[in-house]
Amino acid sequence: MYNGGARSRKGEKTIMEFKILQTKKDYRFMDYEYAINHGFNLDDYETVWEEEMYDYTKRTVDGKPISDSMVLETIFNRFNLYIPENYEARSLSVSDIVVLGEKQFYCDSFGWKEL
């Protein structure tokens, strides 16, 4: 995902898991606060996309660490503007969850909420 100019800190080529989870519950397309107040539960979500990616936490761009927010915004753009041919779910939207390794992020109305 970050090949152009990105370098491993110590030459590592470690891989991490990346997933997109979506729900069909009543709080779908709603912000995090609404979802929490209306029964948000991770068990209501199903995986709609899964792949491996380079572990961005061990990489840099121009000597600076790659942040979660950089990766999340890239993923958001990819699954809204440059949707992979074999992706069969709806575009990435508010209430979806992106899993990056061990971290989970709720797509909120503005930005992301780490769970």
Image (cartoon, rainbow, N blue to C red):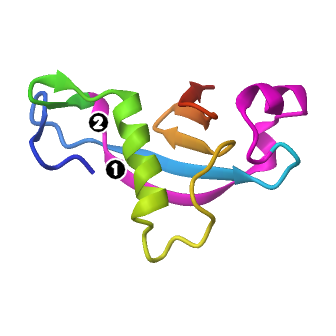
Query: Which residue is label 2 attached to?
Result: 56
Q: What is the magenta range?
A: 28-57
Which residue occupies 72% across, 29% down? 32
Which residue occupies 44% across, 77% down? 85
Provide residue 100's location: percent of width, then percent of height.
46, 39
Q: What element carries label 1?
A: strand
Q: Is residue 43 magenta?
A: yes
Q: Residue 53 carries which label?
A: 1
Q: Taking 18 as reference, is 26 left or right? A: right
Q: How many marks?
A: 2
Q: Is residue 21 magenta?
A: no
Q: Is mark 2 on a helix, strand or loop?
A: helix
Question: 94 or 7: which is nearer to us?
Answer: 94
Which residue occupies 63% across, 34% down? 109
Provide residue 36's location: percent of width, then percent of height.
82, 27
Quadrant hosting residue 108: top right
